[in-house]
Amino acid sequence: MALTNAERQARYRERRQAGESRVRYRRPADRRSRPQRWDDAVRTLLALQDEYRAWRDALPESLAGSATAALLEEVCDLDLSVLEAVELPRGFGRDG
């Protein structure tokens, strides 16, 4: 059962008086550069496209004309090599 605002506030005050501190977890910072994150994302997309291609190839004949097959075909027809060929700026005058 959900607590009312008054109950929640009372519990908060009790914790504060007892000196309990809350442990807050932080996600580790992503230290990769933008180009590295781009490359990782493109590799992930290419791997997913391969998985979808394998799924499409493994579809039984009875599902060949289904909506699922059509959507899988759309994903497989995407030209992701364009994303691989993108030359990203290096920034701070290093593009020279």
Image: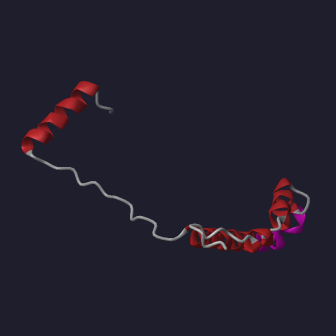
Relative depth, front residue between 61 and 38: 38
- The percent position of residue 96, horizontal first and vertical second, equals 67, 74
Q: Is residue 96 above or below residue 62?
A: below
Residue 55 magenta-drawn? yes
The relative height of residue 31 versus residue 15 in the rendered view (above or below) is below
Q: Relative to 36, is 45 on the left or the right?
A: right
Relative to the observer, which residue lies in front, 85 or 70?
A: 85
Residue at 80% in and 62% down? 75
Q: Is residue 79 left or right of residue 1?
A: right
The residue located at (87%, 58%) in the rendering is 70
Q: What is the quadrant of residue 79 in the picture? A: bottom right
Residue 2 vertical placement versus 94 (above, below): above
Q: Is residue 87 left or right of residue 72?
A: left
Front in this rendered view, residue 85 or 54: 85
Residue 39 at x, y percent in the picture: 64, 73
Q: Is residue 13 left or right of residue 53?
A: left
Question: Where residue 88 appears, x then y in whole percent?
Answer: 67, 69
- Quadrant of the rendered structure where residue 89 is? bottom right
Closest to the observer: 85 or 56?
85
* Residue depicted at x 68% and y 70%: 42
The stretch of residues the image draws in magenta is: 53-62
Q: Quadrant of the N terminus?
A: top left
